Image (cartoon, rainbow, N blue to C red):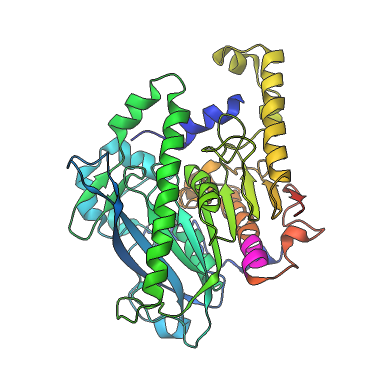
Amino acid sequence: MRDKTQRFIVGAMLVGTWLSAYPRAGAQQATGRMSLPAPTGIYGVGRVSYALTDESRTEPLSTTPGAWRRIMVFVWYPADRKATQGMKPAPYLPDFDKVLPKLSSGDVIDIFRPSKFREIDLLPQTDVVENAPIASGKQQFPLLLFSHGWGNPTFLYTAELQDIVSHGYIIVAVDHPYDTAFTLFPDGNVTLFAQDRFDKETKKPNGLSNYAKERVEVMGDDNKFTLTEILKYANTRSLHVPFYKRVNEHEIGAFGHSIGGLAAARTCQIDARVNACMDQDSDDYRGSPFIVTPLDQTEKQPFLLFVVSSADLWSPATVNPSDADLAAQKLTRPDYMALLKEHQTTETNQLAGIQGGSYRVMLFSLPGFIHRTFTDQTLLDFTGDKEGNNLHNFQVAQAYILAFFDKYLKGDYHTVLDSQTPIDKRAKVEQFPAH
């Protein structure tokens, strides 16, 4: 499995006080085990998993003809902190010992890059408890659908997901088989990234963009199907459904990283039950975060686009490429600038045209902020972060993630997104009003 995120970036390129709340992160404990930031909300974190089968769709990537589309779903939900104290935390990568023999050494390197995998016992400890009782009371929580980046296991977003949940959200993290490094099903079946198909399709003219478009459509359909099934579960009394009657069906959002961000945007286009969507750093070869549809079609719901590298059309490095970079792309500087201007206009016009309003949050000026900062991969790379930028960058991103969903799902219209004082003065926040 190669580094899919960076290869997808190439296509796009052509074209304070709150922060101190995190008590730990990215440090190596005396035992050699890595640490993640502790959740900052008032809730503990529980998790339960489900294997779902969509019998309305066949799986063309399966070696079994006529097989249905199968997905794994992990529901992260608020729990009482006191009730989970002393309970065994969930492993960082559940049953990774069963998966590891099926992965090549290159796969493992790529999963953890820029950090390094040493052994299972040294993976970080989570703040998650499997099958924990949900937080007491009758409060209903907003629900967020989450889609991972290409090749990234869902669990590589543990820091982000457990922190959001601790602030009173239920997150339904969807493992999209063949688009993540591995998906482990309860029956022991392990589905790996569709490397052969990826290599075959990306060798064709415009192959990377076409294949990404195809997979985004699949991931969007996964999200829509998952939402239907999880809402059924939420209304079914069962020992296997700790979130029974605790989902607010009128407060639903979707977000994702890299190609998962494109999938989140697609989810808003195809599912009116979703009230707000977020793309963590991804757009297509046209400069659009709506890869499946024509440029005049976006979404109606509020939207937030993070811009770091994959969706970057604005940083000094992008606006002023070196002669060597232009030569590698076989472009003259005037042609490059004309193409860049076209893509900038596309992105801006689309964000301005979203009926529910939108934000563009540019974080590329924060030192060390890279495409993988939205994952745990940089947090675990303590040897390459002498200045402590990785934790700070994670905290900045989390502030804006929570602010967006707090505003549009919880009705808090006094968030850092609308403040005159940014979380970090190097961050640039642009708002495109609703209309």
In front: 164, or 106?
164
In front: 214, or 361?
214
Residue at left 47%, top 37%? Answer: 5
**Residue 15: which quarter of the image?**
top right
Is residue 126 at least partly visible in the picture? Answer: no
Residue 151 painted magenta? no
Is residue 333 at least partly visible in the picture? Answer: yes
Image-based side of 338 in relation to 279, left or right? right
**Residue 344: which quarter of the image?**
top right
Number of numbered callouts drawn: 0
**In the picture, which quadrant includes the N terminus?**
top left
In front: 89, or 315?
315
Residue at left 73%, top 44%? Answer: 352
Residue with the most extreme right position: 420
x and y percent of residue 298 in the render? Answer: 62, 44
Residue at left 35%, top 78%? Answer: 236
Above or below — where is 269 with respect to 27? Answer: above
x and y percent of residue 106 in the render? Answer: 31, 35
Q: Which residues are magenta?
A: 402-409
Residue with the most extreme front position: 56
Q: Magenta stretch mostly in which secondary structure?
A: helix
x and y percent of residue 426 in the render? Answer: 74, 47
x and y percent of residue 161 in the render? Answer: 48, 62
Residue at left 71%, top 30%? Answer: 316
